[in-house]
């Protein structure tokens, strides 16, 4: 009995571990390895790790892909631009998401589930189609320009497509639920009596917010920001459909490198450098995720 | 006093909801527009179902939708099995060897930029084919394997947090009464986590159905899923039949979400009532 239980447990933990090892961890090692090779005309289109010279094996490690990334200014500027776009979008998401989450957390018991569902519902509809919807709104002959022209607010159509503004809109729009949900989960647990006590002692609402709500909300803010920032750095669809053509984001550069130039080693090196930039935020997120689950376990009676 | 404090956040909430829904509503409205110029309303001949009709005769879109449907169904089902196993292990087994590894590998895909996941999976499939001759090129099989992998991470989180929300006493009681582990799972644990499994399956299905970036890497030249067809159409500009397609998808999802939310709340309320009754009868 004891034996079957441990072997059963081993199976339960072992199957998903094995799956993720093979389809999540090993692939990264392959990317790492391909980033240290060179392009060649063969299948697969990169040089093998071990070459045979006169019957002797020798290890072939090339750093040319990385050298290339640092000589062509295109890559560095794409990394910096991606970090900037992700940071600004995350901040905008927070500025809009925090008051929204606060209002939902303070709503009555009857309206709260409805509001939550309204926030989550767009997330269940196609991400691609929601980004696409903005093309119709932001175009030079699009809905926003038509409305503003008809109302006489502007006399010439505004150029909004293929700008940073359009990318910010697209990212904030697509990732807003990821900001609101962790914030809501945090704010909902706050003890309202603290705010009432602050009000009784004469603190204006804004000071009570800054001194009580905001410090308590830090874990939610960190989680929401990471959930927006990390994927936004590598975003591909939004900048491709809405963004500038003279300055690409790094996710687009990687894809083009792979599909257009067919340079797998450079595409891999781009991916490895992106991972290096994101390693700290990803570890932070994992730590938060672990603590969140443990805190939930601690709360149960 | 209390309401004045909420004026700002409430107006932001209204503003945010308007921001979330205006693009979707405009897409729906313009799907009934006769004009091919998507943003110019042709008042004389609209509203019309013209684009819905064209959609029904578009073999490329229908074929891609059928492929996406099959991939999403299989991916969601496999992801639920794997994710439930992982969620059980993380929530119930305490500290075990490889726990940190498993926890890390299920949290990372949630935030990993899709271009990296897509590239890494394709390189894996190419290397595998080179080494053992399988899989034979990219296609529905590689798409499904990739989708299972990123979906199972979401299922794991949902199942794990549901399980940590319950204490182990029910399972321990069943064990003390001599039930075998499999029986305990089927009779006690599974009914408890069924809502989590249901929402994990729906979430996986949606993620798989929607995914473009990872799919683009692992699809190969022969097979196009629905998001791939939409993306190639949309890159060339706005097309009215995509508006019609979007409207159909939004409607299906909205009905599904509302229905499943109501179902789960009913279930939850019934469970709570049962627990209260049980507690009352014990006194």
Image: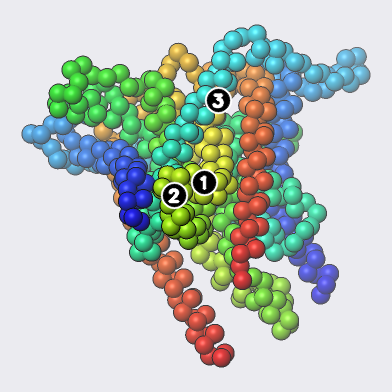
Q: Is A262 placed above or below A107 here?
A: above
Residue at 56%, 71% (x, y): give it.
B191
Q: Identify the residue under disc 1.
A: A211
Give the distance between the C-alpha atoms of the residues marked 1 and 3, in whole angstroms: 30 Å
**Dot 3: within a 10 Å radius of its alpha carbon, few (fewer than 14), some, or many (20 or more) residues?**
many
* Labels 1, 3: front one: 1
Q: Identify the residue under disc 2.
A: A203
**Dot 1: within a 10 Å radius of its alpha carbon, few (fewer than 14), some, or many (20 or more) residues?**
some
Residues at circles 1 and 2 in contact by the CB criterion of under 8 Å: yes
On the image, the x and y values in percent for residue A278 come to 63, 31
Tell me the element at label 3.
helix
Upstream in the sequence, badge 1 or badge 3?
3
| Res. B84 in view | no
* Chain for disc number 2: A
Quarter holding residue A78: top right
Pick the quarter of the image with the C terminus of chain B.
bottom right
* Chain for disc number 3: A
On the image, the x and y values in percent for residue B258 come to 36, 59
Q: Which mark is residue A93?
A: none
Same chain assignment for discs 3 and 2: yes
Q: Identify the residue under disc 3.
A: A83
* Labels 3, 2: front one: 2
Give the distance between the C-alpha atoms of the residues marked 1 and 2, in whole angstroms: 10 Å
């Amino acid at each position: 009995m004891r034996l079957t239980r441990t072997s059963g447990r081993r199976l339960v933990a072992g199957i998903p571990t094995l799956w993720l090892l093979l389809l999540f961890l090993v692939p990264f090692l392959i990317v790492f390895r391909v980033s240290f090779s060179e392009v060649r005309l063969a299948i697969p289109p990169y040089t093998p790790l071990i070459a045979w010279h006169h019957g002797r094996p020798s290890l072939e490690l090339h750093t040319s892909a990385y050298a290339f990334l640092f000589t062509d200014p295109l890559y560095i500027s794409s990394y910096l631009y991606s970090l900037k776009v992700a940071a600004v979008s995350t901040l905008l998401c927070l500025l809009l998401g925090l008051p929204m989450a606060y209002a939902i957390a303070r709503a009555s018991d009857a309206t709260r589930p409805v509001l939550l569902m309204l926030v989550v519902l767009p997330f269940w509809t196609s991400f691609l189609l929601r980004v696409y919807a903005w093309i119709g709104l932001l175009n030079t002959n699009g809905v926003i320009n038509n409305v503003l022209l008809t109302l006489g607010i502007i006399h010439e159509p505004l150029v909004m497509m293929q700008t940073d503004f359009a990318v910010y809109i697209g990212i904030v729009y697509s990732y807003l639920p990821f900001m609101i949900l962790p914030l809501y989960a945090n704010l909902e647990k706050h003890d309202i009596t603290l705010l009432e006590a602050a009000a009784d002692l004469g603190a204006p609402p804004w000071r009570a917010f800054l001194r009580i709500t905001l410090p308590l909300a830090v874990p939610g803010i960190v989680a929401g920001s990471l959930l927006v920032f990390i994927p936004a750095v590598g975003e591909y669809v939004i900048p491709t459909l809405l963004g500038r053509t003279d300055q690409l984001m790094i996710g687009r550069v990687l894809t083009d490198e792979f599909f257009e130039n067919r340079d797998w080693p450079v595409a891999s090196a781009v991916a490895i450098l992106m991972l290096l930039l994101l390693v700290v935020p990803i570890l932070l997120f994992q730590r938060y995720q672990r603590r969140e689950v443990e805190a939930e376990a601690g709360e149960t009676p | 006093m209390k309401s004045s404090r909420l004026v700002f956040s409430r107006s932001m909430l209204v503003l945010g909801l308007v921001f979330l829904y205006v693009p979707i509503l405009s897409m729906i409205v313009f799907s009934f527009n006769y004009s091919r110029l998507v943003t110019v309303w042709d008042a004389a001949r609209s509203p019309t179902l013209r684009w819905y009709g064209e959609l029904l005769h578009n073999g490329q879109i229908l074929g891609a939708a059928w492929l996406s449907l099959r991939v999403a169904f299989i991916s969601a089902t496999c992801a639920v099995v794997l994710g439930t196993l992982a969620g059980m292990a993380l929530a119930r087994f305490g500290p075990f060897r490889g726990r940190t590894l498993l926890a890390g590998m299920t949290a990372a895909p949630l935030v990993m930029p899709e271009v990296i996941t897509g590239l890494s999976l394709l390189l894996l499939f190419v290397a595998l084919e080179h080494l053992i001759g399988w899989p034979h090129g990219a296609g529905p099989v590689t798409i499904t394997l990739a989708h299972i992998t990123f979906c199972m991470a979401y299922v794991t989180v949902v199942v794990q947090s549901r399980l940590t929300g319950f204490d182990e006493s029910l399972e321990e009681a069943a064990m003390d009464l001599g039930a075998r582990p499999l029986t305990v799972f089927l009779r006690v644990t599974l009914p408890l986590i069924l809502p989590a499994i249901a929402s994990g399956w729906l979430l996986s299905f949606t993620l798989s159905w929607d995914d473009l970036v990872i799919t683009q890497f692992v699809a190969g030249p022969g097979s196009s899923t629905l998001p791939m067809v939409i993306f190639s159409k949309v890159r060339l500009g706005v097309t009215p039949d995509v508006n019609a397609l979007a409207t159909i998808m939004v409607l299906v999802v909205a009905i599904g979400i509302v229905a499943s939310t109501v179902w789960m709340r009913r279930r939850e309320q019934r469970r709570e009532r049962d627990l209260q009754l049980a507690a009352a009868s014990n006194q």
